[in-house]
Amino acid sequence: MKTTHNQLRRYALISLSLVSLTFNACKEKPKQEEKAQYDLFAAADNIIKSINPLEFPDREFNILEFGAVADGSTLNSEAINKAIDSCSAVGGGKVIIPAGDFLTGPIILKSNVNLHLETGANVLFSTNHDDYLPVVHTSYEGVELMNYSPLIRAYKQHNIAVTGKGILDGQASNSNWWPWCGKDDYGWVEGAPKQHDSINLPTLRKMNELQTSVEERVFGKGHQIRPTFFEPFECENVLLQGVTITNAPFWVIHPLKCNYVRVDGVTVSSHGPNNDGCDPEYTKNVHITNCTFDTGDDCIAIKAGRNNDGRRVNIPSENIVIENCNMKDGHGGVVLGSEISAGVRNVYARNCQMDSPHLDRAIRIKTNTLRGGFVENLFVKDITVGQVKEAALKINLHYGIYDNQEGEYIPKIDNIYLENINVENSGKYGILIKGREEAIIKNVTLKNVHIKKAKTPLSVEFSEPIQFENTTINGESY
């Protein structure tokens, strides 16, 4: 992407703040002075400031004027995308989806367009899989491929937004998309095709291992690999704001190789298989705020490519701020991994609530020696946790070992800092850390952390001693 003077200014702002505030402080051992600890989170404010508000020309393009019909059965793909193309062609503006039920195939965002869903707008995505063809360059579980189009896609665009109070309904269900996961809980029946059949994920995994060119990794029709919902790919200046997203085929919000992304006030309510709420991947300078995540998988999961694909792309996900969010059902609240081969650094989570009998962990890091990768500088502050099932904090460097996911790439975990965390019911463990003899976890600090109702307070393997300050588990001081 072309770098402008304004972008250079923003790069300089972030670099200066992170160097002066984060890295210098982090290289010291924990138990620093109070001012130094505060500065760790001041760096997050500079990341937020670097993500400029988006501006669009004062022009409106109503999809009704392009032939859209709000009857819930007429396919409006052509009308919606024609409105977007027309808006972008004249320099941008706002494309309006008014109140009503609009059936559509993939929506293709273009530069300088704000796709705005008015109150009462209900966008229903087609259940005809052929509508998502021809195949496009996309990604599945950290591996690039040619596959069904994401439901909303932008490729190498800039200054794009989806906003408003409407609903984006993927219409995935136990009879559409979800059965392909191969689990009877989601509608799969014995003998039906599924993603783990030899022509699907095993073939894609082998292509990843051999680094077959992406153009040759052709899936789509005749295969069972589900598309993502919202996927800006190699885009800059992205906004997703206000909308509700439900019934996703697969990962819900997936910024891929993007820069300057804000997700604000979005509700994700989607309980299908692998329905992660928001998965920034190979992406930097991200602000996720004021959102609600009620999901079938991780609420927020920071990704960085799987195995050889991650090492080939080699773009860490970094400078990510998560705040003022509400996590309900899900495998984890804030998660780093498991597709993490290019590494993750400088992640800040603060002022969030997490609570559900169906939320497994609050904070989680997961990788193995096949994925490798690194996590540097995860800072978590002011989190209230009602109930989780397994642990308040889980770090696992043995993820997926029963699926033969062992290799020669040693992960590195360094500088994990939790402050002002209150957990009412931590389930099986308070803190669960499983490092490796060849990959000792370093610099884990808990300050003002109070965890209740943990069946096992601590289970720690292959980690430097945790640095505790004013921390209690089940009422006992550490």
Image: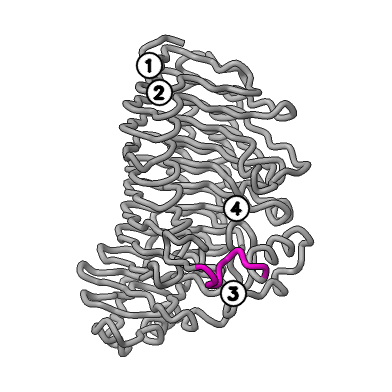
| Residue type indicated by callout 1 | Asn
- Asked if the residues shown at circle 1 and circle 2 are in contact, with their CB atoms under 8 angstroms apart, the answer is yes
Q: Is residue 446 visible?
A: yes
Look at mark 2 in the image and give the residue it sits on. Answer: 454
Name the amino acid, label 2. Ala
Per the rendering, the mark at residue 474 is 1
SS state under label 1 = loop
Question: Neighbour class for label 3 at 10 Å: few (<14), some, many (≥20)?
Answer: some
Residue to which mark 4 is pinned: 282
Q: Which residues are magenta?
A: 190-198
- The residue depicted at 39 percent of the width and 54 percent of the height is 53
Q: Residues within 10 Å of mark 4 (few under 14, many from 20)?
A: many
Q: In the visual, does 136 lie left or right of 66?
A: right
Task: Give the secondary structure at mark 2.
Answer: strand
**Amino acid at dot 3:** His
Quadrant hosting residue 5: bottom right
Q: Is residue 397 above or below residue 59?
A: above
Q: Give the residue drawn at x 41%, y 12%.
A: 470
